[in-house]
Image (cartoon, helix red, strand yellow):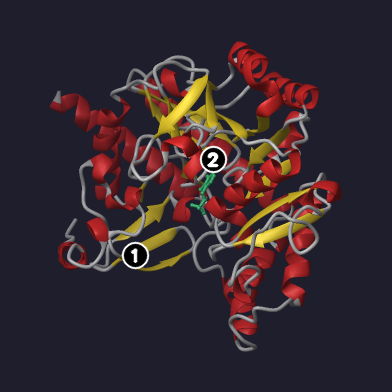
Amino acid sequence: MERVESNKLHQEALSHLVGGVNSPVRAFKSVHGDPIYFEHASGAIVTDVDGNEFVDFVQSWGPLIHGHAHPEILQNVYEKMQKGTSFGAPHLGEIELAKHVKNRFSHMDMVRFVSSGTEAVMSAIRLARGYTEREILVKFDGCYHGHVDSLMVNAGSGMATFGIASSPGIPRDIAGTTLIAPLGDKDAIEYLFRQHGGEIAAIVIEPLPANNGLLVQDHHFLQYLRETCDEHGSMLIFDEVISGFRFKDGSYGDMCGVTPDISALGKVIGGGLPVGAYGARKEIMENLSPLGPVYQAGTLSGNPLAMAAGSKTLDLLDEEAYDYLEYLGSQLEKEVTTVLEKHGNPMRLVRLGSLFWLSPGSGEPPVRADQIPKNAGELYADVHHGLLEMGYMLAPSAYEIGFLSTAHKEHHISGMSHALDQVLARLEVGT
Ligand SMILES: *Cc1c(COP(=O)(O)O)cnc(C)c1O
């Protein structure tokens, strides 16, 4: 597969953009490749600047649940665009999207729109800290919440302790307001609350951790977090930026029977335009300015084009759409698992609805970050490269999940399974 034009543009970009990209994982570093420059995309297919076509299982990292350039979403954005691209003032589109969100997240009385998932989580924790008048957060090793300073922390010398910044540029004092626990570990939570209970503003968790593989949590653990927060007057924040709107039965919290205090949303909610949101019951949301003292604002918040893309995306997510996504997901699971078994299970497929993770290693899927094999990236890089050469695009990192959209067809999935079979066979001959 020729990538002459892509490589040319990448070389040029290197002198203008850091690493040639505006978000690090796009650089293909962890699969030892160079980024591919897209020219256009439609449905499940992306076309690069050299004219190569790929079946896309990345879908802009989650937002495009109806695939690329869905005609009805484009039409809705186009119609709104004629009337102005940004008002900096209220408009009907915000009410429409808020109603959609409240329909799906029954604990929300009010919603605030922002422009990214990062912003949604960042604002949700400010609200929780403001409401509880406490400062400490609890987060889990292996959960990603965007590049929020207080949540860009790793476990230090041991788990269940204060975190250390995972990036330069984050003041030690800020990293030191966050406690880290392993996923699924009730004892660690109990210990942290025994030590710091009265100072903990919130527990923040992806109820379905999906940014470090897909680490499916036991419902009882989420229930335990709810009880612990209630007991200590702390808030439970569910970061559903990636899992929100992915399931027919509602939010992932709903599916587990656990109601958080605040939910943060992003990705699907904007249908491919920049939208994030957070919401909670009235008594909590009333603390936000202009009603209350907790400040949060945005020049482009509630942008009419973004609201239009989001509303149409959610309109189109009817029962039939969810059933189709589940149907595709089960096909993928069946076919890929058969291929993996044939090759002695070098990887496992973890799948929930339209989200999947091709996880290097065998046996029970990991549920905690430290259960993911350290060399997971090695086999994945070869598999990723092999599939790409055959026209199938998976995320360029072993720790990122794949996404199905309503634009995918059965033959895209069987084509990918078949290609995977060939790639694994070739890798076996090579070793
Ligand atoms: C993607 C993601 C974020 C960050 O959202 P951005 O729009 O990239 O800022 C936060 N939390 C979760 C769970 C995510 O998947």
Could you say which is closer to the camera, residue 354 or residue 186?
186
Which residue is located at x 26 percent, y 36 percent? 381
Q: Nearer the viewer, mark 1 or mark 2?
A: 2
Percent of width and height locating residue 7 = 17, 62
Q: Amino acid at mark 1?
A: Thr
The image quadrant that residue 185 belongs to is top right
Q: Residues within 10 Å of mark 2 (few under 14, many from 20)?
A: many
Could you say which is closer to the camera, residue 158 or residue 4?
158
Badge 2 marks a residue whose secondary structure is: strand
Which numbered tag is attached to residue 355? 2
Which residue is located at x 25 percent, y 41 percent? 31
Horizontal arrangement in the rendering, residue 65 relative to residue 315 (left or right): left
Badge 1 marks a residue whose secondary structure is: strand
Please tell me which of labels 1 and 2 falls first in the chain.
Answer: 1
Image quarter hosting the C terminus: top left
Q: Amino acid at mark 2?
A: Leu
- Residue corresponding to mark 1: 47
